[in-house]
Amino acid sequence: MQEQIIETKNCKQCGSSFDITEKDIEFYDKISPIFADKKYNIPTPKLCPECRQQRRFCFSNERNFYKNQSSKSEKNLISIYSQDKNINVMEQGEWWKGDFDWLDYWKDVDFNKNLLTQYLELHKKVPKQNLTTVNCHNSEFTNYLYNSKDCYLSVLSSNVENGLYVTDSDSIKNSIDISWSNTIENSYEIFNSEHLYKSYYSTWCESSSYVVFCKDCVNCTNCVFCYWLRWKKYNILNEEYSKEEYENKLKELNLFTNDNILEYKEIFYNFLLKKPQKYMNSTSSHNCTWDYIHWSTNCKNSFNVVNVENWSYLYDCWRIKNITDCEKVYDWEWLILDTIISDASYKILFSHNVSSSNNIYYSSDIFNSNNCFLCTWLKNKKFCIFNREYSEEEYYNMVEQIIEKMQENWQWWEFFPANLSPFWYNETVAGEYFPISSDSSSFNKKEWETENNIFEFEYKWWTFNWSTYEAPFPKVDKIIPADKLPDSVGDIPDDVLNWAIKCEKTWKPFKITLQELEFYRKHNLPIPKRHPNERHLDKMKLRNPRKLFDRKCDKCWVDMKTTYAPDRPKIVYCEECYNKEIY
């Protein structure tokens, strides 16, 4: 059933129109907090869902790493905070050990000054962890990584062993360039798949082994350039061969050289153009819109979610109920609004990186804490404002005054403005999903740490921090353009470990590690010619855009909402027609 539209608004940032529905109003009323027996109603948002997401993304640096130094021990660190920000950073063990009091870093509330500028001052001086990892070993260049070992440049993942360039995945072993997947072993360039072994350049495959350049193949083995197969083996371009014929064909193909891989990617792309695509990637879901939705119910305009119900405008979330406008929220969370990165928490509003906490408002990096307002980098605390602890009665009285002040300044019930972020736009997730030229009028070129910027901060939705800071590149014996690399990994010398390779697209240099080189040799794979960040962006492009279009099924002509634009050269079927074609 279509929701009743209560109001249509124009976004204050981009000018586009967006709807407020009856269910939206119900949720805002349900989550509106009560302090000292007074309910503070949350108004409808001023920005459209896309601009709200862009603003939250400005606070998340997932994969840019820098050399830094602990402010406590002067120990050299790998950190997500660059040196030019002059941020108080500690090694994770030092921070959790806590032989200092987080409440030593606090501010009194000054109602004569902008509350958000005071928050910025506090955030600048409070000690921060250099990275966010839990129970990881020998995995320095990683972030938001859990229960893993021997990893490199892997983020937002768990239970990874000997994994390089792994993104948003679980249970990965001895693999490289894996994204949005789980239970993958001895594989390379796998995307949105599960339970694969010794597979390469494949997407949306399941419970298969030795599949190469395949899409939507389930319970298959020894297949190349295949699509839509179930319980098949020894197939090339969906044509079945004997084992001997198949092995002879593979020798002729000579799959794993850089030149051939580029050609075969094009062949596979053209092959897929002739095959129908399902209008939405979903599994066992009901009354849902957008894409990559699994085992979920009653979801609206959401992307990449698993086991959730009664929510809207969610991205990369799982096991949650009754939340809206959030990214990367996990593990049985309830009543969360306009928040990015949270787990095992309840009633979190307008916050960033909250774990095992409840009743948190306008705060960031809060762990095992309750009832915090405008706080940052706290653990095991309660009834805090600007990191100062109050009695319960004092806390509620102060919160009432703060809300009234924020209402006066039009700051009430909106996520932090983007230019409060400790990260530059071009190093955040916002830069990945919403790329903008550095000469855009949206950018604030003032440096984040300058005193003028702190005390003269203006509350604007539409300005972003931007910097030209480049981390120093390690010394190498030589720098070689990617097109000068030998085509076969067998011709790559050990000396490549002392070289820098210039990305064929951006010319940004990158290095190959020993762990990586050994993997390529073992699997007879060519050395990549693109910088790891470019390879990540390439995989992002394999996913459909986070936009919905009106389109008709190319078989039965029923109207449908899909992430396939009408002008894209794809054959797109509704679910019923797609299932009939496969099964």
Image: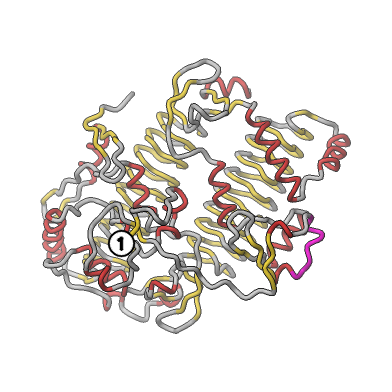
Element type at mark 1: helix
Which image quarter holds the C terminus? top right
In-front residue for pair 537/158: 537
Residue 169: x and y, percent?
A: 55, 51
Magenta segment includes 493: yes
Q: Quadrant of residue 23?
A: top left
In the picture of the structure, the residue carrying the numbered disc 1 is 420
Q: Is residue 346 magenta?
A: no
Figure disc tally: 1
The foreground one among 357 and 52 is 52
Q: Main secondary structure of the magenta part?
A: helix
* Residue kind at label 1, given as amino acid type: Leu
Q: Does residue 288 appear to the left or right of 273 in the view shown?
A: left
Residue 500: x and y in percent read 66, 67
**Residue 367 appears in view:** no
Residue depicted at 44% across the width and 58% down the height:
426
* 165 to the left or right of 391: right
- Range of residues picked out in magenta: 488-495
Colouring method of the image: secondary structure
Q: Position of residue 156 (x, y in %)?
A: 50, 56
Residue density around tag 1, few if under 14, some if 14–19, many if 20 or more, within 10 Å: many
